[in-house]
Image (spheres, coloured by chain):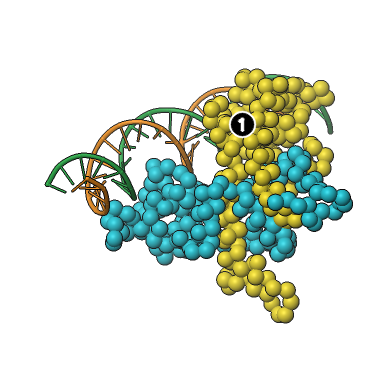
Chain colours: A cyan, B yellow, C green, D orange
Amino acid sequence: MADGRGSSTSGGESLLFLTDEQLRQGTEAMFFAYRGFTADPDRILVDLAYGRAHHRAVHFINRAPGTTVNNLLNILGVTKQSLNRVLRTLISDGLVISKVGRNDKRERHLYLTDDGHALEQKLSNAQRARMRAAFRDAGPDAVAGFRTVLEAMMDPEMRQSYTRLKETGT
Amino acid sequence: MADGRGSSTSGGESLLFLTDEQLRQGTEAMFFAYRGFTADPDRILVDLAYGRAHHRAVHFINRAPGTTVNNLLNILGVTKQSLNRVLRTLISDGLVISKVGRNDKRERHLYLTDDGHALEQKLSNAQRARMRAAFRDAGPDAVAGFRTVLEAMMDPEMRQSYTRLKETGT
DNA sequence: CTGTTTATGTCAGTGTTGTTGACACTCCAA
DNA sequence: TTGGAGTGTCAACAACACTGACATAAACAG
C-alpha cells in the first residue's frame, strides 16, 4: 500500500502522485506511449497485408509453442471467429501449422514454421529496439517501476496469463 | 543487436534489465495492461453506441477546450475524415459544439457541452479508478519510473504533444 | 451405448475505426 | 486576384472486432 516513501515532501503521507492531474497525465502517457509501442511493427505489417491481430497471434504462438486455439483465445481476449480469420491466413500463408492433439484430438496445437519464426523475429526486433532504447534511457529502477504499475493495471485474469507466461512459458 | 543478451560490455553496471527476455516481458506487460487500461471506459461506451475514438476526442477536447480540428488531428494521429465522422456524431448528439474561429474563421474551435462534460467525467472516472488503484499499489517511486519509461517510448512528436499538454494545457 | 459437453471451424451479417482519393467551400495572405 | 491552408463531405474500402447459427469430431458422464 501507499506509504508515501520516496516522497520529497515532509510530514505524513504525501499522496500527491494520486491527484487527478497526475492520473490524467498517466492516462495520456499510456495513450501516447502505446502508439509508439505499436508503430514500428505496424509499419512492417502494412507491407505484408497483415495487421496487429496477426502480430499478436504470431507473438504468442512463438511464446508458447504448441498452445491450443482455446488458450490463445483466452490470452488474446477475442472471439474465436476473429482469431480464426487470422489463423486461417497465417496457416494458408505457411507461417503457422496446426497439429491435432495427441491426448485430446479435438485440440489443435499451434506452431510457427520457419517463415513464421522469421516474421516473428522481424516484428519483435523492431518492437524491442524501441523498448530497449526506452529502458536504457530510463534506467533499471524506472523499468522496475514501469513493470510494477503495468502489472497493477491489468485485469486479474490477464495478470494471471501474464505471470504464467513470464514464469512457465505456457 | 541480435545477440540475445543485451548484456553489458566490460565491467560496469549490470544491464540485465535489457535482456531480450526482459524486453519481451515489457512488451507483454504493455499489451495486457493496455487492455485493462481501456476496459472500463469501453464497457460504458458500448451502451452509448460510441467507441474509443469518441472517448479520445472527448478527452482531448476537455483537456484543451477550444482546440481546433487540426490540432486535435495531430494529437490523435488519425485522418480528418476519420475524426470528422466521430465529431459529427458528437456534435449532432449535443456533446460537442464547434465554434467558428474569431481571428481565423476557417478554424473550428471545439468545446464540450454540459452533456459532453458529463460523459467525459463518467469515462475518466472509470479509467482513473483503475489507474489510481494501480498507482496506489505500486507506490510513488514505481509511478515515477512508469512515467519515465512511457515518455521514452513515445515518438518524438507525440512526446512533444504530451509535454505541451502536461505543461500548458494546449 | 446414449446424450451432453467441449474444442474447433465456418458462414453470414454488422459495427467501429481506420485508410485514400476526390471535390468544394471559406478565408487569409501575398 | 490567385494560391494555399483549413475545413467539411462523399464514396469506397480494409482491418478487426462483434453476435448468432450451425457443423463436426472427440471426450465424457450416465
Taking the image as drawn, is residue B80 in sight?
no
Q: Residue at x 78, y 24 (%)?
A: B101
Residue type at mark 1?
A: His
Residue on which the image places disc 1:
B54
Above or below, A74 relative to A124: above
Q: Nearer the viewer, residue A67 or B51?
A: A67
Q: Position of residue B62 (x, y in %)?
A: 73, 31
Q: Position of residue C20 (x, y in %)?
A: 56, 39
Q: Tell me the quadrant of the picture where the C terminus of chain A can be found.
A: bottom left
Q: Residue at x 60, y 29 (%)?
A: B86
Taking the image as drawn, is residue A90 in sight?
yes
Q: Position of residue A163 (x, y in %)?
A: 54, 58
Q: Is residue A76 left or right of residue A89?
A: right
Q: Mark 1: give few (<14), some (14-19) or many (20+) Cα within 10 Å.
A: some
What residue occupies the far right of the structure in this picture?
A10
Q: What is the chain letter for disc 1?
A: B
Q: Is residue B64 left or right of residue A151?
A: right
Q: Position of residue A60 (x, y in %)?
A: 47, 57
